[in-house]
Amino acid sequence: MSDQKTNRPVARLRENALSADIWENKHENGLSHNVSFSKSYQDKEGNWQRTSNFGDRDLLSLKHLVSRAHDTVRERQSEQRKEDRPQSRQRRARTRDHER
């Protein structure tokens, strides 16, 4: 069931009726991130729906949400680099010791 975990966003941000889902992809070159933006609304029957279309009144909130998503992605990348550093230092130290 670990596949379910990989199919969930690592973060969800909200700004009024708008949301940003941040997805993290691990691959051999490290991490990459994708962000999907959506707007929640109720249809005529009262059911909640989501759309990726935004009206002119949504733009300022969308701008704030994009900025927050950018900050969240940068923080996650910074954390990942911190986690990777000790391993990189150990590899460089082994390489230097091996070269001597």
Image (cartoon, rainbow, N blue to C red):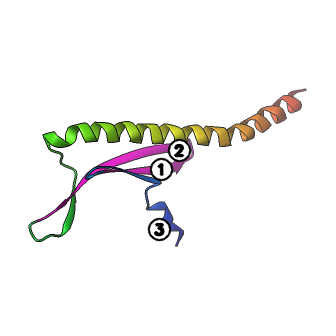
**Quadrant assignment, res 7:** bottom left
Residue type, mark 1 in image: Glu
Kindly identify the residue that appears in the image at 74 percent across and 39 percent down. 86
Q: Dot 3: within a 10 Å radius of its alpha carbon, few (fewer than 14), some, or many (20 or more) residues?
A: few
In the displayed structure, 46 sits above or below 14; it is below
Q: What segment is highlighted magenta in the picture?
A: 19-43
Query: Where does label 2 land, which residue?
Result: 31
In the displayed structure, 45 sits above or below 80; it is below
The reply to whether the C-beta atoms of the residues labelled 2 and 1 are less than 8 Å apart is yes
Q: In this view, does 46 lie to the left or right of 16?
A: left
Residue type, mark 2 in image: Leu
Q: In this view, does 34 lie to the left or right of 32?
A: left
Give the CA distance from mark 2 to mark 1.
7 Å
Q: Which residue lies furthest to the top in this view?
A: 100
Q: Position of residue 82 (x, y in %)?
A: 65, 38
Query: Where does label 3 land, which residue?
Result: 4
In the image, 68 versus 28, the foreground residue is 68
In the image, 39 versus 61, the foreground residue is 61
Q: In which quarter of the image is the C terminus?
A: top right
